[in-house]
Amino acid sequence: MAVPDSLHRGSLRRRFRLLPVVPSILLLVLFMLAPVAWSFYASFTNAALSGKAALNPQWIGLDNYARMLTDSVFPLSAWLTVVFVAVSAILGQNALGLVIALLMTKSGGATASLVGTAVVASWVLPEIVAAFAAYAYFSQDGTLNQLLGMLGVHGANWLYAFPMAAISLANVWRGTAFSMLVYRAALAQVPRDISEAALMDGARGWQRLAFITLPIIRGSIATNLMLITLQTLAVFTLIWVMTAGGPSNASTTLPVLAYQEAFKLGDIGYGTAIASVLILIGMVFGTVYVRLLRRANP
């Protein structure tokens, strides 16, 4: 049976429309999917940086994953990673970004521009520069203790006494700008007539926020949560510069542990196994947020 010319031409048009995205797909496969696939493969081997295993790694099956069950550092790192994401991303960046966006929307004008510039300044800094700035602020002789000293208060060694609090606050400072920009754009799309109608009906500020604004921007909330969660799961430079995972693994998140095992101790197989677990955790978070997005945008 002959294919009608109209269908044939339509098929050709669809194929031609895909041509511009082919280079992007190839780059994603080459620089993202291929390293991830190699990481999963290496996690089932005894690959190392030196020795026989470096030249000829052997397949060892699930041994690296079984080792995690007996490794005292791995469960601690997994827990610290969850705490770091929950405190600095879900609660910190997300909530603070929304609050700043709401305040900027209400204030408007020069005040909003000044606040926006101050918040975005930390975000546009190169990551390594922001990490050293945070280290200089929280170190024993750093800016925070200098300011406390001017008030007659003797500051603690924050990076040693409270390492997770220090890196969480630094990550909030570093990443809040992204959430603020997302919510500023979302709030601009909220119809003013609905808010004004609620105001005329006697709804208070928190009521308009809870029952009108937040339901309208729930899609943006889910998108923002997904992006900042995945970004925070992969934070390495900030933690490494500030604490290097110390003291005594008190701030060793999974990315830091994977680096230590793979490159400091030379156990590539075990390091990539930890990285693979981190990827799976990211996939779980991503799946949850995608479902939230579908519910927010039926």
Image (tube, grey):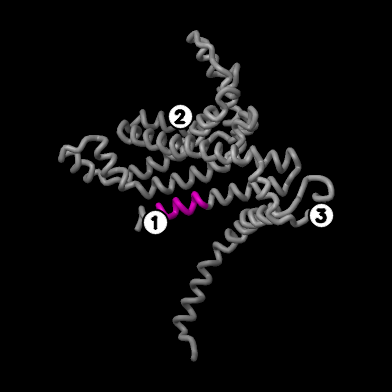
| Image spot of residue 143 (x, y percent) | 55, 18
As measured in the structure, the alpha-carbon distance from the residue carrying label 3 to the one carrying label 2 is 52 Å
Tell me whether circle 3 and circle 2 mark residues in contact (CB < 8 Å).
no
- Residue 118's tag is 2
Q: Residues within 10 Å of mark 3 (few under 14, many from 20)?
A: few
Let me know if residue 290 is in the magenta part: yes
Q: Give the image quarter of residue 26.
A: bottom right
Which badge, 3 or 2, comes first in the chain's sequence? 3
Q: Can you see residue 94?
A: yes
- Residue 294's tag is 1
Compared to 82, does 288 lie above or below? below
What residue range appears in magenta? 284-294
Which badge, 1 or 2, comes first in the chain's sequence? 2
As measured in the structure, the alpha-carbon distance from the residue carrying label 3 to the one carrying label 1 is 46 Å
Question: In what element is the residue under mark 1?
Answer: helix
Q: Residues within 10 Å of mark 1 (few under 14, many from 20)?
A: few
Compared to 64, does 7 lie above or below? below
Question: In what element is the residue under mark 3?
Answer: loop
Q: Give the image quarter of residue 160.
A: top right
What's the residue type where badge 1 is placed?
A: Arg
As measured in the structure, the alpha-carbon distance from the residue carrying label 1 to the one carrying label 2 is 34 Å
- Residue 56's tag is 3
- Residue placed farthest to the left in the image? 201
What's the residue type where badge 2 is placed?
A: Ala
In the picture, which quadrant includes the C terminus?
Answer: bottom left
- Residue placed farthest to the front in the image? 70
Compared to 42, does 72 lie above or below? above
Counting labels gives 3
Q: Residues within 10 Å of mark 2 (few under 14, many from 20)?
A: few
